[in-house]
Structures are given as C-alpha cells and as structure tokens.
Amino acid sequence: MSQRDEVPTPLQRHLAGNGSGERQSVTPVDAFKLARRKFLAQQRVDMNELAGELGVGRATLYRWVGSRDQLLGEVMWSLTEVGLERAKQDGRGKGADWVLSIYRRFGELILDTPAVLHFVRTEPECALRVMTTKASPQQARVVAWYRDLLLEAEARKGLRLKLDAETLAFVLIRVAESFLWTDLITGGEPDLSRGWEVARVLLT
C-alpha cells in the first residue's frame, strides 16, 4: 500500500511551517483556526461564512484549503493527533496488549468528544467521507500513526507482526471505523467490544 503523491495545499504548507514567508493580514492558518473554533463550538463550518468572516473571497479560501472536506480533515486531525498521543501515554502492558490498550483508549476518546459526535450526527455522509476516505488527509495520517506505533511495538515491546505494519495498521483502522460508526454504515448499533476482539485476533 502507498499513499498518493499529492501537492500540499497552502494550508498544509503553513501548518507544516513551510509557508511562503510573505506577511499577510490573513493567512490560511487563520482559516484553519476559525474553522476549528466553529467545529469545537458544534457549529457548521460553512465556507461562505468562513470567507466572509475572514474578509477573503471564496476562491481564495478554496485555493488555501483545497476543499471543505480537506479543511475539515485538517481540523479533525488536529484533534485526532492530540487524542492519539494521549491514548499512547495511557498505554499499558507489552506487545499486543500495549497496542490494544492504546487502540481501545483512542476509541473511547473519540466517543467522548462532543464536537465529533455532533459532526457525525448532523453531517453523517460528510463525516464518513472526511474520516474514512481519501477525500481528506485524516485517514491516511491515522493509518501512518498506527503503522509507526506497530513498528515501535515490534522494536521495543516484543510484538510479533503477522502482516507488514502498513497493511496491519490500515486493517485495524478499518475495523475501528466499522464498529465505531456502525449506525451510519449499516444502521446497526455500535459495538466497540466486538471491534476490540477483532483487533486482538489480528495482533495476537
């Protein structure tokens, strides 16, 4: 598996610290910060309103962020990255147990984040697209994070991988998505415990 080579948006370059260096009264990062504030306040991130509040044209805003899905993906990742590191800090045990404790804790943190649940409830199709497809950078970054976690577990925690780390990370994330958002995908009730059971089979 490999990620597509894509030209980063101006927002992605600015967030990575590789902005143009030009002094601007409003920058792509300002658009990101405003969108993040609205998301956390459980308000819809409307691109027309965002452009108006920033005092820029819609064309400029889209040039900065790429698309609404990409912008929402950046917002989601800013929350996800913090949650993943927090879950890792709470990780316990060795080998598969260490990975599974982080995996489970992160799932719990997702369900304890009101802004994410509001997004899923009010914009289910968009939320699934942003979180589970290449429409945004979110899923690819989560997979990459878990790939690195698996490699660390193999090197330092005694984990024996059944698959290559990239493939296993992708499968683990798809399993988590399937059981976290069962109600959106199939209309059934979410059952996190079954997701963890599947993950344990893959890791042990």
Image (tube, rainbow, N blue to C red):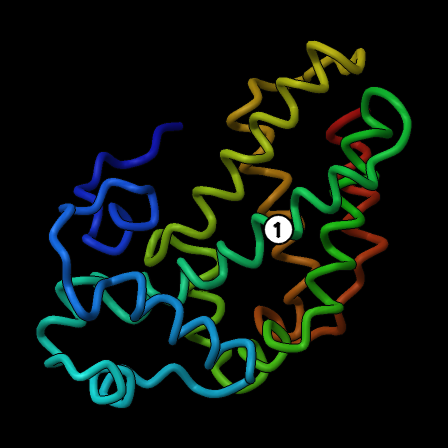
Residue 121 sits above or below residue 99 on the image: below
Residue 20 sits above or below residue 151 on the image: below
SS label for mark 1: helix
Query: Quadrant location of residue 99?
Result: top right
Please name the residue shown 9% across and 74% down the image: 59
The image position of residue 64, as x and y in percent, is 18, 62
Image side of residue 105 versus residue 114, left or right = right
Query: Quadrant location of residue 197?
Result: top right
The image position of residue 96, as x and y in percent, is 81, 25
Image side of residue 134 versus residue 8, left or right = right
Instruction: Tell which residue pokes out farthest to the right in this image.
Output: 93
Q: Nearer the viewer, residue 35 or 201?
A: 35
Q: Which residue is mark 1?
A: 82
Residue 167 sits above or below residue 178 on the image: above
Image side of residue 113 versus residue 171, left or right = right
The image position of residue 153, as x and y in percent, is 72, 19
